[in-house]
Amino acid sequence: MKSMLWLSAALAAVQIASAASCSKAYTVVSGDYCDKIGTQFGITFAQLRNWNPSINSACTNLSIGQVLCVAESTSTSSTSTFTSSQPTPSGTPGCTFYTIKPGDSCGYIKGKFGITIQEIYEYNPTFYNCNKISSYVGKQICVTKPANKYAFGYPVFQGGQTLVSEKTVVIKDAKDFCSFMPPAPGDLVAPTEQQALVQCTSSSVAPGAKTFPSGYIKTANFYNNTVANYVQITGTIDITKWNMSSSDQGGQYDFTGSPKLAECAGYNSFVSLIEPNVPDFCIRCCQSPGDCPTGISTYGCAVIVPGTY
């Protein structure tokens, strides 16, 4: 969980397991992130959150000087339990199953059952990466639309991110967020997708980010889906602030390598569009790739990231 440590002027409230159940405390220092702390003390991210309920699901709210519990007493049980806002998975998916076999690929499953890669993700919210399908051998996935797609569980962050300067977007709320933009004023969106750079409401929101041009963001609406585990920003832009053309139909940035090394901090996938001809923008960061559809950029923000514009 290599989420960056965002500096804050004030320390976060210290919420750790009770003194009776916490046998070792650690004080956060500059450069820390959850994966690093977990490796240092030989604990999982789930344990770290369970003992420190103040840590959010993306591990983006650590503060220098914050005291964390990193070991629990073996003589007592923890008195702090992380409570998810998601309901408990139950029932059956109500779909046609396929058991993944050695040598399978998403392309094979797509051809065998006449479904798209995007549908594989949509039908299976805890199936995260076609490139790592070998890790799912022996597991069942839905190959028809399920009636209850969360029966097997809800999507969660898989960790393992390497957050690259100028290539990492962040969504915290309507005041603190980022988006990819063409590298220079006047550049068309689609032809420069690989050269896109991150701009944010403040340069401190993401590593190496620049600040949006003054007045570029006209409206920004934040939405957090606590069941599907995604966050999004939808809104309108003033294209004159980046010298965009009103005839530019825009383009899409996403987690599949557009641009290369692009990530949304604390999320497994993301999709973002700019449409100067509308003019609007949208960005959604998801734990399930099925909630961040790619390959359909011509449908536009209104279809790919429905919301308030």
Image (cartoon, rainbow, N blue to C red):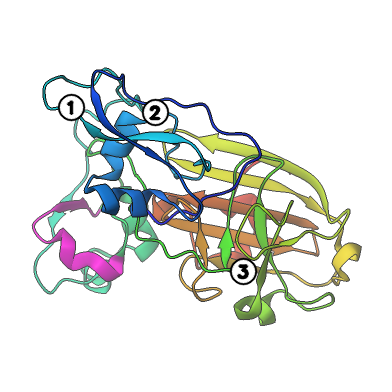
Mark 1 residue type: Ser
Q: Residue at x 50, y 45 (%)?
A: 60
From mark 2 to mark 1, how far is it between C-alphas? 17 Å
Callout 3 environment at 10 Å: few (<14), some (14 to 19), or many (20+)? some
Asked if residue 24 lies left or right of residue 194, the reply is left
Looking at the image, is mark 2 or mark 1 earlier in the sequence?
Answer: 2
Q: Residue at x 54, y 59 (%)?
A: 271
Mark 3 residue type: Glu
114 in magenta: no
Find residue 25 and report its horizontal and vertical position in percent.
33, 34
Callout 1 environment at 10 Å: few (<14), some (14 to 19), or many (20+)? few
Q: Which mark is residue 53?
A: 2
Asked if residue 126 lies left or right of residue 201, the reply is left
Q: Secondary structure at mark 3?
A: loop
Find residue 275 and report its horizontal and vertical position in percent.
74, 63
Residue annotated with mark 1: 73
Q: Which mark is residue 166?
A: 3
Of all residues, the one furthest to the bottom in this rendering is: 191
